[in-house]
Image (cartoon, grey):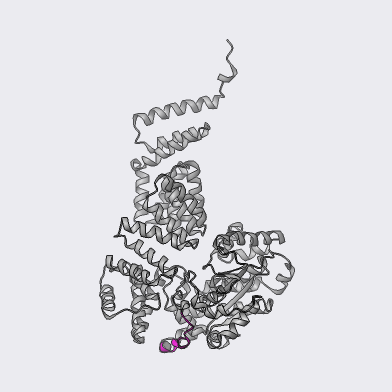
Amino acid sequence: MTLAVGNLKPPEHQGLDAAVAALRQAVARDPRRPQAWRQLADHLDAAGDRAGAAAAYLQHVRNAVHDPLLMNAAAAVHANRIPEAETLLRRQLQQAPTDVVAIRMLAEIAVRINRAEDAEHLLERCLELAPDFREARHNYALVLTRLNRPEQAIAQLEGLLRDEPQHPGYRNLKAVALCHTGDYEAAIGIYEDLLRAQPGQAQIWLSLGHALKTAGHVERSIAAYRTCIGLDPKFGDAWWSLANLKTFRFDETQLAQMHATLARGDIAPEQRTCLEFAVAKALEDRAEYAAAFQHYATGNALRLEQIPYSADDTSLLLQHARATYSADFFRARGGSGHDARDPIFIVGLPRAGSTLVEQILASHSAVEGTMELPDLISITRGLRRAAHDKRAGAYHAELARLGPADLRALGEEYLARTRIHRKLGRPFFIDKMPNNFAHVGLIHLILPNAKIVDVRRHPLACCLSGFKQHFARGQSFTYGLRNIGRYYRDYVELMDHFDAVLPGRVHRVIYEDLVADTEREVRRLLEYCGLPFEPGCLRFFENDRPVRTASSEQVRQPIYKAGVDHWQHFEPWLDPLKEALGPALQDWKK
């Protein structure tokens, strides 16, 4: 008997069909078997039935609550027992590499331990297997936002919102991503809409306050922060947000309330840290400098426990940069990189006056201000991945191996990454990220025509100001006088090195000189940038552009000269800082 060719199947397909049939029977008898659903999905995928596989993987997700191992791992993740959870999940994935629930949880762990790139890859695999796994797609959008790819995050969220347009979690994350793209008014609209439906959400009131402050709606931001405190008086972040406006003054009742809250024993360490900084600022405003310093010191000590820092590691990292970027190194790579002149990089240290310089430049008709852009740092991470070495300084060696075409491609990548932040069509834009001083060599190689402005402030004024600032993230070197003193010294030494090997490449603005003779320093700055003088640059405080940094309200006012020597009120407690600064205490102004 002859069979039609179309009815014949290879033996392995016949085996797949039998396995699929058996697994379908198994889940029909007992649908609460997540691993049977996963095995069914695996077999359907192998048979080329992607739609069927995706549906089966989704059933695996829905029934994961019946898997003891997955539930034990979830409990460990929830309790923040990270090593235990990771061990359980990796053991499960060795046996079942397509367990999308385990993959998603492992990605959540990666986010918690600041390995967002690892989380991204895990979630991409998860969604490849189970594209309808909505929780994983939400996680993916969150990771993309943290990796400074907000436009991609918004695209993921739009897909989720098409099916669930009122989902509060998706809408909240979209508002966060919109803030990352500079679309603050749209974000404010979402937050306000969410709060009309759920007015008791303190965290959303806080987020609304941040967006309002950045967009220049100061009184509305204060009202939002106060509402947040009314809902949760222990929410130290809201107290600090009021203090961080710099122009807000606490009254006696509010100060007493903060003291009473600090006396409680049921405050989370992160919120206690914020409260210590807020109380310190309130006392400083009352000229109670000794008491203020003690609260600043306590807040810094608490924060340093949460984000440990090694000054030795930083010193070694910057020494490696000095050793790599010699004059011969740059000469050998002359003519490389992208020839764009658009970017103006502002570097230095936090609290050195970089936001003021940014505001001055952004008041020029040819220059667009953006925000603190992490795109250059993202490029360094990509170089480290290419080098298969996650150490912070590893990218220098990888960069040294690149040829002219590669360096130009990195310049193009930077311009593409930052394009979303350019909304006004102006020929120049500002990338103000103070810590990019460590990447001057990279900037010069990939964008040799970009301008680099180093904003520098008296070391005691700058370092003390950093010590008094509770940063939203990063800047772990500021949480200790000795640490920040060494960091300032390392920064000066690195910039001295670039001045020697790339003479004239970096323009330096001394904050105290800018305050003393603003017009002269502004004219010097504009001349370096190749821009004609415009009087509007002297009236920078009339610029209503969004400002995200701690100086947002200060740069909306004329320059305040009396603040230059304010650090002297705290001088009795600055000996550790002076010792750490060493020669930089005298040789900082070059």
Residue lying at 43% horizontally and 55% vertically, measured from the top left: 109
Q: Considering the image in quadrants, where does the C terminus appear? A: bottom right
* Left or right of residue 575, residue 584 in this image: right
Where 473 falls versus 89 (above or below)? Answer: below
Q: Between residue 547 and residue 79, name the one nearer to us.
A: 547
Where 228 falls versus 46 (above or below)? Answer: below
Q: Considering the image in quadrants, where does the N terminus appear? A: top right
Q: Between residue 504 and residue 313, name the one nearer to us.
A: 504
Q: Where is residue 472 drawn, in percent x and y?
A: 43, 68
Q: Is residue 273 visible?
A: no
Where 578 falls versus 51 (above or below)? Answer: below
- State the image quarter where residue 95 is shown: top left
Q: Is residue 554 magenta?
A: no
- Stretch in magenta: 557-569
Residue lying at 41% horizontally and 61% vertically, measured from the top left: 188
- State the image quarter where residue 531 is shown: bottom right
Q: Where is residue 476 drawn, in percent x and y?
A: 46, 71
- State the image quarter where residue 34 is shown: top left
Q: Is residue 434 visible?
A: yes
Q: Is residue 563 magenta?
A: yes
Residue lying at 43% horizontally and 60% vertically, measured from the top left: 187
Q: Where is residue 302 drawn, in percent x and y?
A: 37, 72
Where 352 falls versus 117 (above or below)? Answer: below
Q: Between residue 174 and residue 315, name the one nearer to us.
A: 174
